[in-house]
């Protein structure tokens, strides 16, 4: 354990000599680890006529391979917490949210090395699940998205950078509980997660599903190898189904995250 | 001078940026994204309650209920001045019409609940005594461990001075079948005991239900072949006859240990839901006789817990179960082959007439004593 700590200190110290917040196109691997708070607002008429709000913890990890012309990445995050309606504590429920993203970016040519603009796209899997009193009531949505994505990063003095990231789903497959909230198929498939996340997926057009992720970030470059960051993400999902018997939902998440990024 | 000023602006950037983040996150509040809830008043709660049943309840067709008539009777009784107590009474009366103990309303603040059609079922609570059975009628008692601390849910033994095994199942819950190898071992030991006798009395009186899987597991001890028992369909549309695909459920042998001799199943009005499912399965098996009272007649699975704007909760049946001949057992229950029931006085006097009748039946019909 001491050896690992010593190696880490040497690694960081070595990196500190090469600190720079300017962006040069070169190849590297990058790993991001993050944690934070997730403040959510939910209205899901399949679950309840009441509006819910709550707070949870969030954890995330990302691997990115940066190339001369862009990057590709895989990212996973998970958050869990509690939410309730204002009318009563007896509405207290638990939520879990898992996301997996897989995609890449193309680096746009910009003469000024202080700015970095990337355009790209990624596949996103999203599972949001709410459970009231050990499945006395539950609701969920599962989406499989293709999202265009733009990121802009600006280097500023004192080894700092600011970051804006925006994406929205262009093509979505949506999975929701049945009209009654539960049916025989869910019961049969409850121990088959792959079936649950793929069966009965319906294509959700932009007319019926609107969503976006807006991320604003700040990074302090400890070295060429390490960055510390603060992120705010506003994630919005609104489903207004074609079939009027299905229940609409709206989910808004405010996420405040701290992260550590290392390059190698 | 201009360069210094530019430098200051650059240094200020992160702070301006963070200020922007703060402003956006403050603006991103509930009111911005979520449309307002409907006002919490008696009329809105009534409309929500009635319409939810109208669109999701599964037994209107099977039981020929006229839900529109309920609206016509009770809607005029509700206005913005209706008190909480009055609304509770109205909702209780509305669901009482459905006579379905899977349907209830619950006030989480006062902890009060009202279960539809349960008053008659609940009378049977006083017509059986665990203590009387264990001390007067059976010997070699073995209690099967479960997670219920209030009463003995599962136990078995032998009828005193008779070549008859006895088993009591008081719930279809409190056992985790998927992660319970010990439970399978218990079943093997129990069936080995049963097989030392000429018959089994399976007592499911006051079995208030639970898991269909547990019911199927117990039936699997006695089943001799795979037999279609029931089909279920869930509501999937606005009309009372809108249902999804039909799913078939079978009674079939499960596990290594089986019992293939005469069986008596004891029931009462408080044999409910998965308890009744077990009885339904047992009645597909040869040499099974049901003795006691008719079961509750509440088969369809219950919905998710639902919420009202005032915080009350409720639940209802959302399926339609049909027997292989296409008729619905909901509202009817399992009718006994031999009808008999205890009164509370019988129990107080130390007599379980239903159990004694089963012993007598085994002697008269099979010569087992």
Image: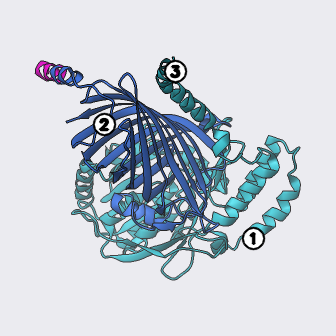
Chain colours: A blue, B cyan
- Closer to us: mark 2 or mark 3? 3
Secondary-structure class at tag 2: strand
Left or right? Give the position of B191 relative to A137: left
- Closer to us: mark 1 or mark 3? 3
The image position of residue A61, as x and y in percent, is 32, 40
Q: Which residue is mark 2?
A: A32
The residue at the point 50 percent across, 19 percent down is B8
What type of secondary structure mainly makes up the magenta span?
helix
Secondary-structure class at tag 1: loop
**Res B2 label:** 3
Q: Earlier in the sequence, mark 1 or mark 3?
A: 3
**Res B66 label:** 1
Left or right? Give the position of A132 relative to B101: left
Up-down: is A180 above or below B40? Answer: below
The residue at the point 80 percent across, 45 percent down is B41
Mark 1 and mark 3: Cα distance apart in space: 83 Å
The residue at the point 21 percent across, 43 percent down is A27
> Observer-nearest residue: A40 or A148?
A148
Chain holding disc 2: A
Up-down: is B169 above or below B340? Answer: above
Q: Residue furthest front?
A: B1
Residue range (magenta): A1-9
Up-down: is A196 above or below B21? Answer: below
Cβ atoms at labels 2 and 3 below 8 Å apart: no
Q: For residue B236, say whether it is visible.
A: yes
């Amino acid at each position: 354990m001491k050896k690992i700590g010593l190696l880490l200190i040497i690694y960081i110290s070595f990196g500190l000599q090469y600190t720079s917040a300017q962006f040069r196109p070169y190849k590297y691997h990058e790993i991001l680890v993050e944690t934070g708070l997730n403040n959510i607002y939910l209205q899901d008429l399949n679950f309840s006529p009441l509006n819910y709000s709550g707070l949870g913890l969030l954890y995330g990890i990302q691997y990115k391979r940066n190339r001369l012309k862009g990057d590709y990445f895989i990212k996973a995050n998970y958050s869990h917490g509690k939410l309730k309606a204002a009318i009563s504590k007896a509405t207290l429920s638990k939520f879990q949210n898992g996301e997996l993203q897989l995609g890449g970016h193309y680096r746009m040519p910009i003469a000024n090395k202080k700015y970095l603009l990337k355009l790209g796209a990624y596949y996103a899997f999203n599972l949001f699940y709410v459970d009231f009193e050990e499945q006395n009531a539950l609701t969920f949505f599962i989406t499989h998205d293709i999202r265009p994505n733009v990121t802009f990063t600006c280097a500023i003095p004192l080894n700092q950078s600011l970051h804006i990231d925006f994406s929205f789903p262009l093509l979505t497959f949506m999975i929701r509980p049945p009209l009654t909230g539960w049916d025989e198929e869910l019961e049969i498939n409850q121990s088959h997660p792959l079936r649950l996340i793929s069966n009965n997926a319906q294509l959700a057009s932009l007319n019926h599903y609107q969503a976006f992720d807006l991320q604003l970030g700040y990074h302090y470059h400890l070295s060429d190898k390490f960055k510390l960051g603060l992120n705010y993400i506003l994630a919005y999902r609104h489903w207004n189904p074609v079939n009027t018997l299905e229940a609409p939902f709206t989910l808004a998440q405010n996420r405040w995250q701290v992260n550590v990024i290392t390059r190698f | 001078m201009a360069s210094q000023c530019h430098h200051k602006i650059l240094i200020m950037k992160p702070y301006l940026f963070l200020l922007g983040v703060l402003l956006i996150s403050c603006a991103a509040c509930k009111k911005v994204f979520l449309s307002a809830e409907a006002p919490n008043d008696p009329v809105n709660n009534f409309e929500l309650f009635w319409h939810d049943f109208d669109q999701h309840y599964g037994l209107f067709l099977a039981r020929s209920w006229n839900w529109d008539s309920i609206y016509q009777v009770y809607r005029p009784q509700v206005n913005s001045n209706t008190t909480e107590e009055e609304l509770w009474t109205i909702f209780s009366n509305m669901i009482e019409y459905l006579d379905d103990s899977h349907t209830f309303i619950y006030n989480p603040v006062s902890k009060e609940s009202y279960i539809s059609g349960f008053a008659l079922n609940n009378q049977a609570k006083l017509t059986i005594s665990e203590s009387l059975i264990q001390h007067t009628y059976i010997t070699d008692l073995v209690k099967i461990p479960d997670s219920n601390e209030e009463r003995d849910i599962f136990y078995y033994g032998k009828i005193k001075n008779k070549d008859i095994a006895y088993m009591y199942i008081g719930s279809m819950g409190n056992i985790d079948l998927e992660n319970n190898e010990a439970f399978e071992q218990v079943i093997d030991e129990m069936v080995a005991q049963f097989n030392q006798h000429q018959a089994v009395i399976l007592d499911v009186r006051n079995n208030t239900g639970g898991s269909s899987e547990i019911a199927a597991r117990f039936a699997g001890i006695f089943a001799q072949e795979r037999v279609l028992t029931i089909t279920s369909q869930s509501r999937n549309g606005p009309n009372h006859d809108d249902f999804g695909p039909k799913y078939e459920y079978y009674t079939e042998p499960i596990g290594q240990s089986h019992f293939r001799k005469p069986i008596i199943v004891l029931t009462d009005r408080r044999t409910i839901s998965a308890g009744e499912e077990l009885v339904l399965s047992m009645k597909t098996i040869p040499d099974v006789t049901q003795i006691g009272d008719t079961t509750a007649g509440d088969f369809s699975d219950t919905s998710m817990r639902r919420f009202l704007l005032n915080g009350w909760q409720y639940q209802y049946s959302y399926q339609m179960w049909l027997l292989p001949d296409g008729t619905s057992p909901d509202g009817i229950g399992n009718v006994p082959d031999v009808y008999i029931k205890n009164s509370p006085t019988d129990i107080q006097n130390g007599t379980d007439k239903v159990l004694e009748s089963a012993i007598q039946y085994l002697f008269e019909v099979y010569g087992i004593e």
